[in-house]
């Protein structure tokens, strides 16, 4: 039975006891990372990616080959790009979650995993600020739209980070979901490794050619270069601070494919800036699809768009 925590040290021991099996899976799979990365890299997709992401990806690639280290989630480039660790986020987000859900529900949604050695900085729920942040996106979406995630059969996520939002969304849904994550090859390989350890290798599949099927009820890792040739279908399209970090061609690709057929949208994005000139285009295309845009009160220049 899950129990509330009181210190990072206690949480570290607690997680390592409960998630010990992930170490064996990681040891077994890390040697296949380079091969998965090769297979994910065998396609195009460069027009969708910004220069900044090309550079970041090259730096992480150098750090994760020939094999990712045990603590790959502590890689400084990965943290900078996709791990929320500001106490300000926690102060704004956790109280809202605690008002909406009881401790048992939060423990089961938020509990961290052992693989990758994420930093545990929210001892009460044995979790990280990043997992609270990802759960908060889902909470805001559910609250604003009334969507029952248990009734969502398929999700496409554009730009899934290391797979953490997918993990929490699957916990939230509590029912089998066919989940597709579209990303650049390096992050496809990271998601394959992370989610295989967390969910079990039989629940994750790499879609690496035109004939590999999208498997129902699994997480399907789809490198962006293949998405054009075989666009997936979804009830819900998710993209948090990802489509906004791509080129406008990427945004037009999603629009041109009718948002993969999704009738529901969970989007987070920011205003355009020097690095990401097309970022605010996400708000324009989301509004045109019928989504409502919500400025994020504590994050100036940040928005959700929900449908
Ligand atoms: C800032 S991170 C956000 C990650 C995650 N969605 C989150 O909210 O923590 C941006 C994500 O977009 C992905 N990305 C960048 N260029 C992309 C492209 N051309 N196609 C798909 N995903 C891309 C990155 O690899 C990364 O996973």
Image (cartoon, rainbow, N blue to C red):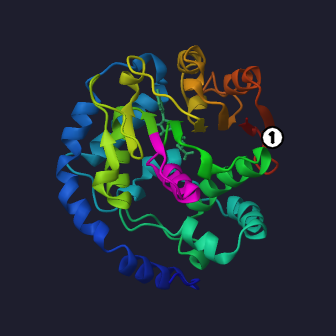
Instruction: Check mark 1 vs ligand 1: CB closer than 8 Å? yes or no.
Output: no
Is residue 167 within the magenta segment? yes
Q: Residue at x 63, y 22 (%)?
A: 277
Where 192 sits versus 106, above or below? above
**168 on left or right of 278:** left
Quadrant housing residue 188: top left
Q: Position of residue 239 (x, y in %)?
A: 58, 37
Name the image quarter holding the C terminus: top right
In-image side of 201 versus 300 (left or right): left
Please tell me which residue is depicted at 17% across the width and 51% down the height of the picture. Answer: 31
> What SS does tag 1 mark?
strand
Task: Tell me residue 66's x, y (percent).
Answer: 19, 46
219 or 62: nearer the eye? 219
**Is disc 1 surrounded by few (<14), some (14 to 19) or many (20+) residues within 10 Å?**
some
Q: In the drawing, does residue 35 fall left or right of residue 155?
A: left
What residue does disc 1 label?
Answer: 295
Q: Is residue 98 magenta?
A: no
Rendered location of residue 123, percent (x, y): 57, 77
> Which residue is drawn at the image coordinates 45% and 38% (left, top)?
181
The quarter of the displayed image where residue 227 is located: top left
Q: Nearer the viewer, residue 162 or 219?
A: 219
- In this figure, what is the number of numbered marks? 1
Above or below residue 287? Residue 90 is below
Which segment is the magenta one?
Answer: 161-179
Residue 126 at x, y percent in the picture: 53, 75
- What residue is drawn where x is 79% and y is 69%? 99
């Amino acid at each position: 039975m899950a129990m509330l925590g009181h210190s990072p040290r206690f949480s570290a021991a607690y997680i390592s006891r409960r998630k010990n099996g992930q170490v064996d899976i990681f040891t077994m799979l890390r040697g296949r990372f380079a091969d998965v990365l090769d297979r994910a890299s065998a396609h195009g997709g460069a027009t969708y990616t910004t220069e900044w992401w090309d550079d970041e990806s090259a730096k992480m690639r150098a750090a994760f080959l020939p094999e990712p280290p045990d603590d790959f989630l502590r890689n400084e480039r990965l943290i900078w790009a996709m791990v929320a660790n500001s106490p300000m986020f926690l102060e704004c987000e956790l109280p809202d979650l605690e008002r909406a859900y009881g401790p048992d529900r939060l423990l089961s949604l938020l509990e961290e995993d052992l693989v990758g050695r994420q930093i545990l900085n929210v001892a009460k729920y044995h979790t990280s600020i990043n997992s609270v942040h990802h759960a908060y996106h889902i909470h805001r979406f559910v609250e604003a739209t009334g969507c029952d995630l248990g009734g969502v059969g398929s999700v496409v996520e554009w730009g899934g980070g290391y797979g953490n939002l997918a993990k929490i969304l699957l916990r939230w849904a509590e029912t089998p979901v066919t989940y597709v994550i579209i990303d650049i090859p390096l992050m496809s390989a990271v998601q394959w490794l992370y989610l295989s350890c967390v969910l079990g290798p039989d629940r994750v599949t790499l879609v690496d050619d035109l004939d590999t099927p999208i498997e129902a009820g699994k997480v399907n890792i789809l490198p962006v270069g293949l998405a054009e040739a075989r666009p997936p279908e979804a009830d819900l399209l998710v993209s948090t601070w990802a489509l906004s970090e791509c080129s406008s061609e990427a945004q037009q690709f999603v629009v041109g494919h009718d948002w993969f057929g999704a009738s529901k949208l969970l989007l987070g994005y920011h205003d355009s800036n020097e690095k990401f000139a097309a970022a605010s285009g996400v708000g324009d295309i989301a509004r045109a699809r019928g989504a409502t845009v919500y400025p994020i009160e504590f994050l100036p220049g940040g928005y959700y768009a929900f449908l």
